[in-house]
Amino acid sequence: MQAVVLAGGLATRMRPHTETVPKVLLEVAGRPFVEWQLEKLARCGFSRVLLCVAYLGEQVRSHVGDGSRFGLRVEYADEGPRLLGTAGAVRAALAQLDDAFVVTYGDSYLPFDYASPLAMLVDHDDCDGVMAAYCNRGKWDSSNVQLSPDRQWIAAYEKGSTDDQFDHIDYGCLALRRRVFEPLGSGVVLGLEVLQSQLAMARKLRALVAEERFYEIGSPDGWHELSALLEEKGNSR
């Protein structure tokens, strides 16, 4: 199984910490965050990880290397100096993608099985993607997902929505087929939210409802919260 980790952003909300260190290398519970994430992916059964890097990407390459110490084969795709957005970064790595893969973010830590959206995608040929969603109701961040009445499909995805019908949130783990990115032009600047919205409208995006809340280091509060959680768990996650 292949996981694609988006780790090329500027992390402006985490400045000044990220002025000289990429966000994925910020220390969380005594270790660079990327180590927690890679170990979690390995425990979920992934054998290969593609790290999409850009800003300070050379530091990520130097620290992670080939991934063998995490039980993984880690490869890299570099956006270059012009950031392409989350979907654009995946499109830039098209030649390195499997037919189906998982996409997650380099600042997300999810207490669930990262392989479960991919398993659902492989089992259903009626969709091009599976999004993990959490019943958020505006608690942890702005809700952006509306489920179908049977909770099997993402009925609508709208980033920044204020509609009460959007009571779930993108959990931060998405299984997709490579063919979703093939029509996009090389070097396109595009966010994954555009593709997610299009897939939802076309009824091509299945839903997998996560039971536990998500964690992230994209904000100072989230960073400290996850550090406290992992320290409390005795570094067991």
Image (cartoon, grey):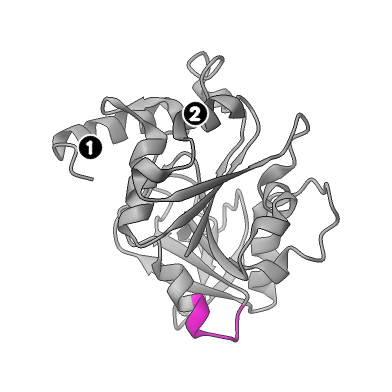
Q: Nearer the viewer, residue 20 or 140?
A: 20
Distance between mark 2 and mark 1 Cα atoms: 18 Å
Residue nearest the observer in this picture, 221 or 84 = 84
Q: Disc 1 designates what residue?
A: 229
- Residue 95 location in percent, x, y? 72, 58
| Left or right: 170 in relation to 177 | left
Callout 2: few (<14), some (14-19), or many (20+) C-alpha neighbours within 10 Å? many
Q: Secondary structure at mark 1?
A: helix
Q: Residue at x 58, y 24 (%)?
A: 12
Residue 144 has which mark? none
**Disc 1: CA contacts within 10 A as few (<14), some (14-19) or many (>=20):** some
Looking at the image, tell me whether mark 2 or mark 1 is earlier in sequence order: 2
Which residue corresponds to the image point at 71% horizontal and 71% vertical from the top-left?
179
Image: 150 above or below 20? below
182 vs 233: above or below: below
Q: Which residues are magenta?
A: 121-127
The image position of residue 196, as x and y in percent, is 64, 62
Q: Quadrant of the C terminus?
A: top left
Tell me the quarter of the picture where residue 11 sits. Answer: top right
Q: Is residue 211 visible in this depiction of the protein?
A: yes
Q: Quadrant of residue 100?
A: bottom right
The image quarter in which residue 98 lies:
bottom right
Element at badge 2? helix
Q: Which residue is mark 2?
A: 23
Q: State whether residue 219 appears in this view.
A: no
Please count the marks in the image: 2
- Residue flagged by tag 1: what amino acid is it? Leu
- The residue under the point 50% across, 23% down is 14
Label 2 sits on what residue type?
A: Lys
Q: Position of residue 50 (x, y in %)?
A: 56, 49
Q: x, y percentage for residue 72?
A: 41, 51
Q: Give the residue at x 86% y 56%.
A: 185
